[in-house]
Image (cartoon, grey):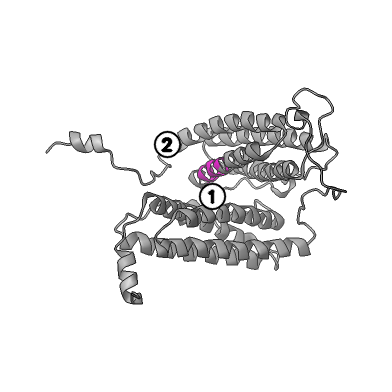
Amino acid sequence: MTIPNDEKVMSEHNIRLTASEMGFLWTQYENDTLAICVLKYFKNICEDKEILPVIEFALSLSERHIQKTKDLFTNEKIPIPVGFTDDDVNVNAPRLFTDMFMLYYIQNMTVIGMAGAVVGTAVCAREDISEFFQKILMEGTELHDMARKVSLSKGTYIRPPYISNPDKVHFISKQRFLFDFFGKAKRPLTAIEITHLFINIQTNALGKAMMMAFAQVGKGEDVKRFFEEGKGIASKHMKKFSTALTDSDVPAPMSWDSHVLDSTVAPFSDKLMMFHTTGMIAVGIGNYGTAAGTCERMDLSAMYTRLSVEIAMYAEDGANILIKHAWLEEPPQADDRQALVNQPK
């Protein structure tokens, strides 16, 4: 029996949102409102005529996502999150970043957004929610491709390192391939290990540059100290990953420090900068976990595990600052059954 489209829509609408659907929509709203603030500032200061359309396209996507998410929350009678507003951005602040940094930022943030959309699509059962995240993924792919092409045309795209093609198929014959903690002459890195080292240098380079900028313009002393500490942690991690590459005679990518300019006027609120930084730390922890699980050299896995603990403790410091200033919005939670039992009748 075929269900008419109007009946199908009605049936689908009457299905409650699952915790996963609610959580991913809430996170999407928070991230898109943040992105709108950042991209509005970028749009106002960008001078490059090739990069500006990338910024404008990214901004239009986030604005469409916000409207769709608002509609879904309204229909489900769920309070619309506060997120970030025009109060969190000063679009007329002087230039803090170069145009090339803005392009690089969009490339990296789009990758993070696509990764979230993949998981969102995988855990959302309701047709309209699944289609929403599928659309976000397709739009993210389009945006990333657009940014990549502009970066390639300008000769600024940072490619992962090259290695020689294998001459034949080889099989691992010694456990030393895995357990090589103490030897001075460790085996060469595999292509996958190189990839993860490269990715984690890149994300730390972006994080270091952003925290350098945020420390320059931050207002609160605790906020500025947090960014200064984060800049040091990112720099240390970059050195460790770069050393792992260069010890195998593989080149390491550059930093983005020179793309942060000398303005001390904040384009963003301390709240936005703190939330953005803690969000990127969470992504970094995930990247380290993936790298630890896929690297076959145990010394690298151990290094990622140690560094994950360090940035997790740093993330806790950031969360405490957000809570201290009442900047941390509470996500949807399960019912507190004990509190309901104890509620006066």
Tell which circle, 1 or 2, labels the residue nearer the N-terminal end. Answer: 1
Q: Nearer the viewer, mark 1 or mark 2?
A: 2
Percent x, y for residue 80?
36, 55
Q: Secondary structure at mark 1?
A: loop
What's under tag 1, amino acid-wise?
Answer: Phe
Q: Viewer-proximal residue, 279 or 134?
A: 134
Q: Can you say which quadrant of the picture contains the C terminus?
A: top left
Q: Residue furthest left?
A: 345
Residue toward you, 109 or 127: 127
List the residue tagged with mark 2.
Answer: 323
Q: Which residues are magenta?
A: 273-282
What amino acid does circle 2 point to? Ile
Answer with left or right where residue 322 lies relative to residue 57.
left
In the image, what residue occupies the spot 57% across and 32% down? 225
Above or below, 81 relative to 226: below
User: Which residue is the site of mark 1?
Assistant: 268
Say whether residue 112 is left or right of residue 49: left
> In the image, what residue occupies the spot 77% across and 34% down?
244
